[in-house]
Image (tube, rainbow, N blue to C red):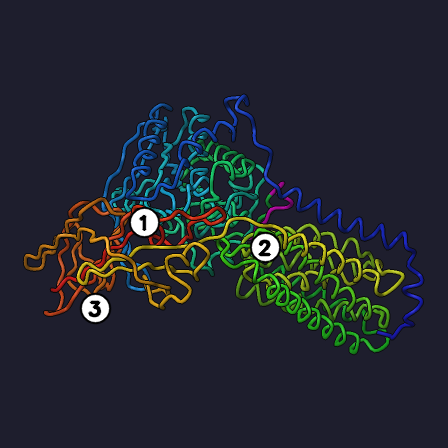
């Protein structure tokens, strides 16, 4: 490495080359992101053999007229509509009614009487069952057009387009997914035999965006081969699956996988503000996402219903590393290739380092490049953290804390990080030359690749291929060759993570921008501006513009309020799980008391008692019978000490402290043992605030806080 004259490099770059190079770079990135967008929805007049989002929207509008959580009349209407719709398509349809329960990690027991809708068409020569799943219950705070009326409608339209098939088609529209995946559990509780079954589950965590295949079952090589061959416009990567496995999120597929079934999970995750909110309406649903979801369901169903499902669900072929290329094809290979490919990268790096030893002061260049890369990562993290502080006020009281200008804020983060990083690298490239500088920068990528190969092999593709091509471009002195795989792979991943995270972790997004810039170092030398400040100034200007536009985006804010009455004392209070706003302040006042509701911090103030009728409690030995005064959304039974000897529907239950029973029957009986003198606290959650409660003003919508907003809660103590 040698120190260079700072003037010639800048002066030697014609303005035309600078402008043209950056425009080409931006066009490649924007084009790659544009190709990630969902396809246009097909009209209702589309051929009957293809999927039409416009036809599916007829079902979405019927299902998502209003919120339809368990325990409501609207839930029952949707159930009956689905039964009639499947029967009209000629499928054998039934309602599976069953009490199901699941234990949570924190010692809670979730219980519900679920009503799954199961529709089936028997195959002509079945080798197994293709199980298509979605759920029809919505969260109580929104109509659920995306989550999950879109998934249900996609399966209805898919069933319409499918004819007689070799394998058996079974469509399971689960109930009680929102309250704990209980519909899926009920289906498994009743399942008998070992027929090969493959599950395709369709979900949503937002109101639009690309549909990702974000989760597979274990030993997924056969599944990935089928997905790669059949899925139209695929969006999938083993990186996304590797990251998803580290999160506490669950879907119905979680329950099926634990039971040993194979499957794939699909969802769109854009427009996060819509998730579990009143924004999740048919009008707010991106019909392009519905089109993509349905096209995938139909294409995979046609393929899988004709194949040997026993072969596809085999569990002896290992895991796959896979990723889509611009949403047009899926590249995949066995995880066992990870270490050999990493070894090739190590050898290529060593060969270039050996070649660079002839340059003046190669080791100082290596260390300077490494140090600059560390500085780059720190700078990216600082930009992300700083933008996070500035954006924080725009996240307050927004559904899922995802600001309405989130895409603009992410663009501001990207451009601001690029401004700082191009300034840093522009300064360095004017003072140092030689391949050792680039190798020192790529040393961080090499270390990350080795670590990922050991700990997270599904993520290695994103590090391996850009690194190999960066080394190749460095060896041939062709920086565009070295940059192309990075430009094709990295921006879509950054965009996907931005959709997944919203603006909840800007530090990570800033780090990724900095990390992704490192292999472009040789190209940045070619794109150096005539003046050091020019490129950073342009990016900073774009960043400020995007931030300003983001601050002007607005939408409804969330607000929660519940009425809580103690049947034993006759006292009542208003309770909110959020800070008082313009509406709840009329109930809570300016100085509400601090309390807790469902184990969460809350604000409260006295309310006039309504003297709601209490539940009737009958105790006969270990049997406890509760008779409710009216149809309830849920009841919560909490013990001072863990309950033992608990039986539900004759089944023994492990130790629990708290029972959540959703959509409980009018009368239910538990068998339990408790120490003499102990007490239970019973909360009966009833739909709706007290009659006469002033409605929310325009601009406020219910918060997504489970059954603890827009409800009446009757609390009473039960002595044992």
- Say few, some or many: other residues with alpha carbon within 10 Å of mark 2 (under 14 / 14 to 19 / 20 or more): many
Q: Secondary structure at mark 1?
A: loop
Q: Nearer the viewer, mark 3 or mark 2?
A: 3
What secondary structure predominates along the stretch shown in magenta? strand
Q: In the drawing, what numbered circle is on residue 640?
A: 3
Q: CA–CA distance between discs 1 and 2? A: 37 Å
Q: Name the residue located 81 percent from the left edge and 71 percent from the top edge.
A: 428
Q: Quadrant of residue 79?
A: top left
342 up-or-down from 176: above or below: below
Q: In the drawing, what numbered circle is on residue 498?
A: 2
What residue would you read off at disc 1? 689
Residue 408 position, x and y percent, is: 65, 52
Q: Name the residue located 20 percent from the left edge and 51 percent from the top edge.
A: 612
Quadrant, the N terminus: bottom right
Q: Nearer the viewer, residue 207 or 643?
A: 207
Q: Name the residue located 14 percent from the left edge and 60 percent from the top edge.
A: 672
Q: Nearer the viewer, mark 3 or mark 1?
A: 1
Residue 510 position, x and y percent, is: 64, 63
- Of mark 3 and mark 1, the one earlier in the sequence is 3
Residue 614: in sight, yes or no? yes
Q: Nearer the viewer, mark 1 or mark 2?
A: 1
Residue 511: in sight, yes or no? no
Q: Name the residue located 48 percent from the left edge and 54 percent from the top edge.
A: 400
- Of mark 3 and mark 2, the one earlier in the sequence is 2
Q: Nearer the viewer, residue 522 or 623?
A: 623
Side of 617 where 308 appears, left or right: right
Q: Residue furthest left?
A: 620
Disc 3 and disc 2 in contact, CB within 8 angstroms = no
Is 322 a magenta residue?
Answer: yes
């Amino acid at each position: 490495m040698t120190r260079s004259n700072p003037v010639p490099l800048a002066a030697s770059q014609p303005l035309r080359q600078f402008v043209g190079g950056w425009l080409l770079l931006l066009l490649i990135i924007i084009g790659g992101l544009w190709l990630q967008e969902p396809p246009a929805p097909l009209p209702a007049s589309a051929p009957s053999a293809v999927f039409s989002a416009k036809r599916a929207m007829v079902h979405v509008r019927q299902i998502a007229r209003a919120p339809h959580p368990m325990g409501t009349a609207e839930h029952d209407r949707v159930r009956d509509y689905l039964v009639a719709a499947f029967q009209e398509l000629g499928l054998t349809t039934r309602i599976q009614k069953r009490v199901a329960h699941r234990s949570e990690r924190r010692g809670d027991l979730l219980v519900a009487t679920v009503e799954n809708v199961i529709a089936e068409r028997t195959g002509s020569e079945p080798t197994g069952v293709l199980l298509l799943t979605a759920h029809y219950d919505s969260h109580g705070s929104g109509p659920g057009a995306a989550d999950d009326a879109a998934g249900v409608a996609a399966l209805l339209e898919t069933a319409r387009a499918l004819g007689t098939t070799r394998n058996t088609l079974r469509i399971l529209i689960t109930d009680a997914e929102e309250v704990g995946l209980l519909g899926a559990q009920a289906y498994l509780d009743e399942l008998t035999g070992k027929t090969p079954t493959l599950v395709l589950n369709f979900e949503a965590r937002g109101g639009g965006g690309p549909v990702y295949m974000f989760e597979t079952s274990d030993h997924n090589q056969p599944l990935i081969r089928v997905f790669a061959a059949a899925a139209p416009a695929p969006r999938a990567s083993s990186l996304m699956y590797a990251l998803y496995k580290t999160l506490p999120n669950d879907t119905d597929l979680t329950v099926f996988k634990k039971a040993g079934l194979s499957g794939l999970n699909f969802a769109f995750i854009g427009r996060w503000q819509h998730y579990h909110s009143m924004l999740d309406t048919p009008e707010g649903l991106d019909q392009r996402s519905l089109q993509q979801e349905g096209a995938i369901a139909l294409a995979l169903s046609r393929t899988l219903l004709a194949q040997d499902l026993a072969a596809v669900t085999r569990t002896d072929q290992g895991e796959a590393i896979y990723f889509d290329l611009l949403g047009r094809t899926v590249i995949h290979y066995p995880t066992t290739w990870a270490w050999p490919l990493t070894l090739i990268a190590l050898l290529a790096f060593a060969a270039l380092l050996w070649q660079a030893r002839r340059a003046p002061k190669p080791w100082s260049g290596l260390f300077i490049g490494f140090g600059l890369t560390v500085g780059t990562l720190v700078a990216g993290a600082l930009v992300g953290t700083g933008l996070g502080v500035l954006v924080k006020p725009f996240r307050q009281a927004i559904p899922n804390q995802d600001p309405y200008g989130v895409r603009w804020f992410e663009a501001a983060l990207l451009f601001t990080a690029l401004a700082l990083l191009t300034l840093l690298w522009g300064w360095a490239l004017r003072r140092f030359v030689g391949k050792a500088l680039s190798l020192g920068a790529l040393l961080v990528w090499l270390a990350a690749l080795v670590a990922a190969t050991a700990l997270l092999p599904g993520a290695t593709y994103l590090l391996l291929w850009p690194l190999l091509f960066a080394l190749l471009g460095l060896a041939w002195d062709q920086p565009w060759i070295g940059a192309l795989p990075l430009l094709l792979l990295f921006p879509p991943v950054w965009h996907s993570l931005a959709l997944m995270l919203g603006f909840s972790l800007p530090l990570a997004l800033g780090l990724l921008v900095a990390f992704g810039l490192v292999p472009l170092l040789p190209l940045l030398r070619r794109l150096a501006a005539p003046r050091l400040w020019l490129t950073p100034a342009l990016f900073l200007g774009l960043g400020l513009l995007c931030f300003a536009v983001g601050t002007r985006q607005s939408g409804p804010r969330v607000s929660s309020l519940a009425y809580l009455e103690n049947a034993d004392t006759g006292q009542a209070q208003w309770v909110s799980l959020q800070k008082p706003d313009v509406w709840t302040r009329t109930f809570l006042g300016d100085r509400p008391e601090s309390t807790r509701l469902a184990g969460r911090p809350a604000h409260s103030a006295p309310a006039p008692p309504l003297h709601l009728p209490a539940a009737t409690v009958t105790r006969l030995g270990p049997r406890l019978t509760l008779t409710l005064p009216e149809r309830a959304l849920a009841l919560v039974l909490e013990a001072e000490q863990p309950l033992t000897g608990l039986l539900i529907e004759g089944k023994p239950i492990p130790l629990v402290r708290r029972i959540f029973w959703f959509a409980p029957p009018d009368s239910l009986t538990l068998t339990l043992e408790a120490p003499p003198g102990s007490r239970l606290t019973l909360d009966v959650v009833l739909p709706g605030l007290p009659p006469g409660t002033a409605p929310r003003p325009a601009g406020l919508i219910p918060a997504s806080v489970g059954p603890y907003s827009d409800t009446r809660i009757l609390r009473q103590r039960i002595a044992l």
